[in-house]
Image: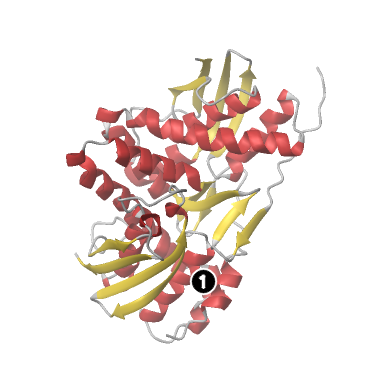
């Protein structure tokens, strides 16, 4: 098996006092909480007339595809293994949970979440749910796969097949090229 | 007001949120997340621009409500945190008014909005001005006919709930939504600043 040195994510977070923005590598970032994330998710799930579930995932995909693609370019992260390592660390740095990409290719992939901000926040706020709720996580994963292979947003879709919020020990996503 | 905003903003803007080995950021009584602001902006904007006109008010209410609950629970977590006790609490002489002023200094430090209270009638009314805020970033050219600072509206009302709505209730059944907030001006609408008027619900 090929050995590689796991690339460590280095985030340069600065406060721009003039406009009061927190920025990481010129991307404005903002702290929020699980109440905010789960209520946005609930809103998306309730707004079926617009397919707001897909909309919320797409917004997460756009945000993270952009962030990760810029990071890879600016830091010369070229190998697939290193890109995956950075993606997993970015997921954790955002407080979104513990992610493991267990398989990745140009047409498909598999991702496991041992911990999930949205699922565990949802359980803390409302209890378990029979249906998957991690639309934000699905969007992150799709954005990650877009960035891994240098493709534009909407090149992949991430389908949640098992969920912490439903009582499973981990969440699983199947990733498929569109 | 006995609050030194500059001192609070300087200290609180440097606080680093640290994730644990599970990739979660437990802190301030909640799980914290740190996302690109564009994520929140794009969902709010794309949602409110797509809903039928007769559904716009309901969609906006739900966006504000998300921030209202976030502001209530996280706000309480902030004002009971060790960071608050170290930096802000020593300056608090008048309760809860100084706490409110301190909370908006933290609100500024954490990148939500460069904001301050410009009018406060204890227990009744508060006017907040925001001179810069990420929710206005969606408009890069021209002016919007729609005010977009849903997050500030919700959090401003939540801070008044904490100050004057009775004891904090972790279930949110009491104390929450005793105040409401209207946005009367917006940078995204061409105004010099955003203005937010909070009154009893």
- Residue A123 is at least partly visible in this image: no
Q: Which residue is drawn at 45% across and 48% down?
A: B141
- Left or right: A115, with B135 as reference point: right
The figure's colour scheme reads: secondary structure
Q: Residue at x 26, y 43 (%)?
A: B59
The residue labelled by disc 1 is: B84
Q: In which quarter of the image is the N terminus of chain B?
A: bottom left
Q: In which quarter of the image is the C terminus of chain B?
A: bottom left
* Residue at the farthest front position: B142
Q: How crowded is mark 1: few (under 14 residues within 10 Å), some or many (20 or more)?
A: some
Percent from the top left, x then y, of residue B42?
43, 41
- Left or right: B21, with B169 as reference point: right
Percent from the top left, x then y, of residue A165?
40, 33
* Residue at the farthest left position: B54
User: Which of the two residues, B132 or B85, is positioned nearer the viewer here?
Assistant: B132
Relative to B61, residue B82 above or below: below
- Residue A34 is at least partly visible in this image: yes
- Left or right: A2, with B77 as reference point: right
User: Which of the two residues, A38 or A76, is positioned nearer the viewer here?
Assistant: A76
Percent from the top left, x then y, of residue A86?
68, 35
* Secondary element type, mark 1: helix
């Amino acid at each position: 098996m090929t050995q590689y040195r796991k690339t460590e994510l280095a985030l340069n977070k600065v406060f721009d006092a003039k406009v009061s923005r927190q920025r990481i590598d010129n991307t404005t970032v903002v702290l929020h909480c699980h109440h905010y994330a789960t209520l946005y998710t609930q809103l998306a799930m309730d707004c079926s007339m617009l397919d707001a579930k897909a909309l919320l995932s797409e917004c997460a995909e756009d945000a993270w595809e952009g962030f990760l693609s810029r990071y890879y370019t600016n830091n010369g992260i070229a190998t697939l293994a290193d890109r995956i390592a950075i993606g997993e660390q970015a997921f954790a740095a955002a407080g979104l949970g513990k992610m493991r990409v267990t398989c990745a290719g140009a047409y498909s992939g598999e991702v496991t979440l041992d911990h999930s901000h949205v699922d565990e926040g949802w359980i803390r706020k409302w209890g378990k749910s029979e249906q998957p709720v991690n639309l934000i996580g699905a969007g992150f994963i799709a954005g990650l796969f877009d960035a891994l292979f240098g493709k534009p947003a909407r090149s992949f879709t991430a389908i949640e097949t098992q969920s912490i919020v439903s009582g499973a020990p981990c969440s699983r996503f199947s990733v498929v090229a569109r | 007001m006995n609050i030194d905003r500059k001192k609070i903003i300087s200290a609180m803007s440097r606080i680093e949120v640290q994730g644990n080995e599970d990739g979660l950021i437990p802190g301030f009584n909640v799980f914290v997340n740190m996302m690109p602001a564009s994520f929140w902006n794009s969902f709010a904007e794309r949602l409110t621009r797509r809903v039928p006109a007769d559904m716009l008010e309901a969609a906006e209410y739900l966006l504000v409500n998300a921030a209202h609950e976030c502001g209530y629970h996280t706000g309480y977590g902030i004002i009971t945190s060790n960071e608050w006790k170290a930096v802000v609490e020593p300056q608090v002489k008048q309760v809860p008014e100084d706490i409110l002023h301190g909370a908006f200094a933290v609100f500024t430090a954490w990148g939500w909005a460069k904001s301050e209270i410009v009018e406060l009638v204890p227990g009744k009314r508060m006017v907040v001005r925001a001179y810069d805020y990420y929710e206005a970033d969606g408009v890069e050219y021209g002016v919007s006919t729609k005010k977009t600072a849903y997050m500030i509206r919700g959090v401003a009302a939540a801070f008044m709930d904490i100050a004057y709505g009775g004891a904090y209730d972790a279930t949110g059944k009491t104390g929450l939504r005793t105040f409401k907030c209207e946005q009367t001006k917006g940078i995204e609408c061409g105004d010099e600043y955003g203005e937010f008027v909070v009154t009893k619900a």
